[in-house]
């Protein structure tokens, strides 16, 4: 008997000066739409290492983990199949912002001027806005 389970993904939330870092997707699904940077966890990789790798690959930024924000597991969150994403709050350590790897662009958006987002990322960002004090957000 084989076991069919969800795939594990990570998403990184980088907040700075009241803005949030997003990437423009280079590939389907949602090609050309904006998303939180992130991706699939590789076999044998810790989720903490995966999120730092994905952020670096997609944005050129070296980041550090502040904390796990939450876990998102709606079976319909990704049209490719059931994924479970662990969402991390991160801080920038070094690097120059540029879209690369799976991202055609990367930039910061004001939290009240977000573009149309892919996956369930609008829901995730709204959860973050509800849970964190706006004064804290504007200092990040």
Image: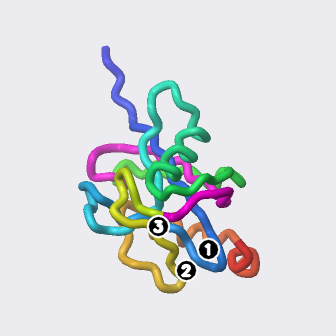
Question: On the rendered structure, is 29 left or right of 117?
Answer: left
Question: On the rendered structure, is 52 left or right of 67?
Answer: left
Eye-nearest disc, 3 or 1:
3
Eye-nearest disc, 1 or 2:
2
Q: Position of residue 133 (x, y in %)?
A: 73, 76
- Tell me the quadrant of the picture where the C terminus can be found: bottom right
Q: Main secondary structure of the magenta part?
A: strand
Nearer the observer, 80 or 90: 90
**Contact, mark 1 vs mark 2 (Cβ under 8 Å):** yes
Pointer 3: residues within 10 angstroms few (<14), some, or many (20+)? many
Which picture quadrant has residue 127? bottom right
In the image, what residue occupies the spot 38% across and 32% down?
A: 5
Magenta span covers which residues? 77-97
Relative height, residue 91 to residue 3 (above, below): below
- Which of disc 1 and disc 3 is earlier in sequence? 3
Q: Secondary structure at mark 3?
A: strand
Outermost residue, bottom side: 112
Q: Where is mark 2, residue-wise?
A: 111
Q: Where is mark 1, residue-wise?
A: 129
Q: CA distance from mark 1 to mark 2?
A: 9 Å
Relative height, residue 114 to residue 46 (above, below): below
- Which of disc 2 and disc 1 is earlier in sequence? 2
Which picture quadrant has residue 27? bottom left
Q: Position of residue 31 (x, y in %)?
A: 26, 62
Q: Where is mark 3, residue-wise?
A: 22
Q: Position of residue 86 (x, y in %)?
A: 54, 47
């Amino acid at each position: 008997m084989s076991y069919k389970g969800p795939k594990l993904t990570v998403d990184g939330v980088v907040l700075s000066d009241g803005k949030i870092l997003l990437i423009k997707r280079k590939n389907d699904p949602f090609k050309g739409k904006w998303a939180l940077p992130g991706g699939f966890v590789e076999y044998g990789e810790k989720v903490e290492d995966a999120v730092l790798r994905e952020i670096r690959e997609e944005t050129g930024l070296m980041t550090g983990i502040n904390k796990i924000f939450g876990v998102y597991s709606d079976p319909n969150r990704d049209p490719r199949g059931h994924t479970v994403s662990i969402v991390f709050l991160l801080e920038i350590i070094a690097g120059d912002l540029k879209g690369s790897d799976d991202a055609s662009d990367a930039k910061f958006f004001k939290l009240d001027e977000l573009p149309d987002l892919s996956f369930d990322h609008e829901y995730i960002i709204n959860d973050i806005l509800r849970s964190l004090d706006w004064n804290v957000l504007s200092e990040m």
